[in-house]
Image: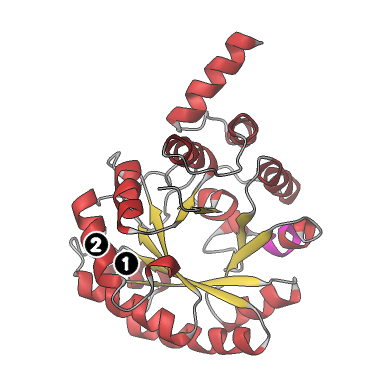
Amino acid sequence: MSDQVRIVEVGPRDGLQNENTPISVEARVGFIESLLGAGLTTIEVGAFVSPKAIPQMQGSAEVLRGVQHLAGEFHVLVPNEKGYEAARAAGAKVIAVFASASEGFSRANINCSVADSIERFKPVIERAQADGIKVRGYVSCVLGCPYDGAVDPQAVVDVATTLWDLGCTEVSLGDTIGVGTPKKVRELLRACAEAVPMQSLAMHFHDTYGQALANLYAGLEEGARVIDSAAGGLGGCPYAPGATGNVATEDVVYLLEGLGVATGVDLDKLVTASNAVGALLGRAPPSRVAAAISAKQRRTS
């Protein structure tokens, strides 16, 4: 557990996209600046999607432009060539494409089959590679689907393999509705690692059933070393009814530091950033570590 673990902070995109309260461009830029100040260096900052589909991500071009002068690696989600063109025009250096391991979720999310979704982003990856832009791939519903129920692990392997073969440098495995358990996580990672190197697999777990940290620990024991998380435990999925937020970055950092893994993240500063965005949303962050540290800060002050 002494190996380096890379945290990909997804709060400004995956965290905010499912919040009912819209956050201004200026506030999102400030949030990202606070996350950088806390020591997080890889941050997903927006999505070049239709504002009708995900209105919370409107202004992602302005957000990206607003942070480009800062030291960090900034990711943006793109669904198709139109989104890619807008992202490139805004100066994107890392993009993410996405596909589902579940047919039901794919049709609910982007109104097409899994195979058709892959055809849509094939030219995106080709153009990004030609332009020297790094591509990350997401696989949704790897451990369960809100529409189809259980998901065949081979379906996950097939999509992950396709993303890897097309040129994605990293494949993030998303438990979109948070139904996974450690045993299933171990089995899935082992299966995917037959086609995609373990060091290129990321764990993206939601905490619907309170299993996210246990699942991450199981994945770490298997050798996975990339974790997606959202400050404060923000987010969910607009197409996965009932799904709670991503695993909280504070909780992940606390776990990793306890295992002897240096993260370079200042928990107090991270909690301050989470509380600030929580105030804009009108609620406290659901992260338990954030709640504990906030209480400690209040006692100290």
Amino acid bearing label 1? Phe
- Please say if 152 is above or below 301: below
Main secondary structure of the magenta stretch = helix
- Residue beneath disc 1: 105
- Residue at left offset 61%, top offset 55%: 43
Q: Position of residue 229 (x, y in %)?
A: 48, 49
Residue 233 appears left or right of 13: left
Residue at (53, 30) in percent of width and height = 283
At which x and y percent is residue 142?
A: 29, 64
Residue 102 seen in the current view: no
Of the numbered discs 1 and 2, the one sitting upstream in the chain is 1
* Label disc, if present, on residue 147 of the rendered structure: 2
Instruction: Tell me if residue 163 can be seen.
Output: yes
Q: Is residue 224 above or below residue 261?
A: below
Other-residue count near label 1 (Cα within 10 Å), few / some / many at <14 / 14–19 / ≥20: many
- Answer whether residue 210 is magenta in the image: no
Marks 1,2: beta carbons within 8 A: yes
* Residue neighbourhood size for the residue with mark 2, other residues' Cα within 10 Å, grouped as few (<14), some (14–19), many (≥20): some
Looking at the rendered structure, the kind of residue marked 2 is Tyr
- Depth check: give the residue in front, 48 or 65: 65
Magenta residue span: 59-63
